[in-house]
Image: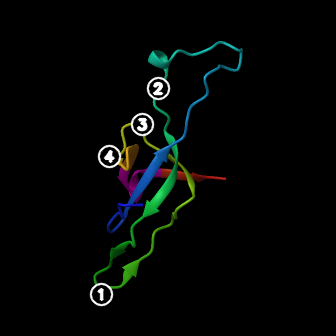
C-alpha cells in the first residue's frame, strides 16, 4: 500500500452491494446507494494521550466495519477508490 494513515485514521475499501433484492428484483446502478460497509485496508498507529503514550486503535487491517453514510473522504490510491476516515466514524465491527 502506497498510503499509510496517520494517528487515528483508517483506510477503508467499500464492499459491493447486492444487485438483487430479497424478492429477486434487480437494482440498477443508478438506484443503488453506496454501501456503508467495508474492509479496513490500513490503519494508523493511534492518538497520543496527555502523557505522550499511544492509544491503540480498536480496529485493524482486515476488519469488516460498518460506518456512517456520509463518513470519510474519498481518495484514489493506486487507481482504486478508497475512503479515509477517523476511527470515531466507524460504528462497529462486523463478524
Mark nearest the camera among 3 and 4 is 4
Q: Distance between the residues labelled 2 and 3?
A: 9 Å
- How far apart marks 1 and 3 lie (CA) works out to 35 Å
State the image coordinates of residue 42 (x, y, percent, origin top left).
45, 61
* Quadrant of the rendered image containing residue 21: top right
Disc 1, disc 3: CB below 8 Å?
no
**Which circle's residue, 1 or 2, is located before the other in the chain?**
2
Residue 69 - label: 3
- What is the crowding at mark 3: few (fewer than 14 residues within 10 Å), some, or many (at least 20)? few
Image quadrant holding the N terminus, namely bottom left
Of marks 1 and 2, the one in the foreground? 2
* Mark 1 crowd level (few <14, some 14–19, many ≥20, 10 Å Cα): few
Observer-nearest of 80 and 48? 80
Q: Which of marks 2 and 3 is in front?
A: 2
Q: Residue furthest top?
A: 25
Left or right, 88 with respect to 24, comes to: left
Using the image, tell me which numbered label, if any, was put on residue 75: 4
Q: Residue at x 46, y 69 (%)?
A: 57
Q: Of callouts 2 and 3, which one flags the residue occurring earlier in the amino acid sequence?
A: 2
Single out the residue that lies furthest toward the right.
23
Dot placed on the residue nearer the N-terminal end, 4 or 2: 2
Q: The magenta stretch spans which residues?
A: 84-90
Q: Which residue lies furthest to the front in this view?
A: 78
Q: How far apart are marks 4 and 1 (CA)?
A: 33 Å
Magenta residue check for 87? yes
- Dots 2 and 3: beta carbons under 8 Å? yes
- At label 2, counting other C-alpha atoms closer than 10 Å, the crowd grade (few under 14, some 14-19, many 20 or more) is few
Look at the numbered discs 1 and 2 and tell me whether their residues touch, using CB distance below 8 Å: no
Amino acid at each position: 500500500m502506497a498510503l499509510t494513515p496517520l494517528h487515528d485514521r483508517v483506510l477503508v475499501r467499500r464492499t459491493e452491494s447486492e444487485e438483487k433484492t430479497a424478492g429477486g428484483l434487480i437494482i440498477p446502478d443508478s438506484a443503488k446507494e453506496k454501501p456503508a460497509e467495508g474492509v479496513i485496508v490500513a490503519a494508523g498507529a493511534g492518538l497520543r494521550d496527555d502523557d505522550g503514550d499511544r492509544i491503540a486503535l480498536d480496529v485493524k487491517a482486515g476488519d469488516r466495519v460498518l460506518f456512517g453514510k456520509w463518513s470519510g473522504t474519498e481518495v484514489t490510491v493506486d487507481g482504486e477508490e478508497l475512503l479515509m476516515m477517523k476511527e470515531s466514524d466507524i460504528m462497529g465491527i462486523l463478524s
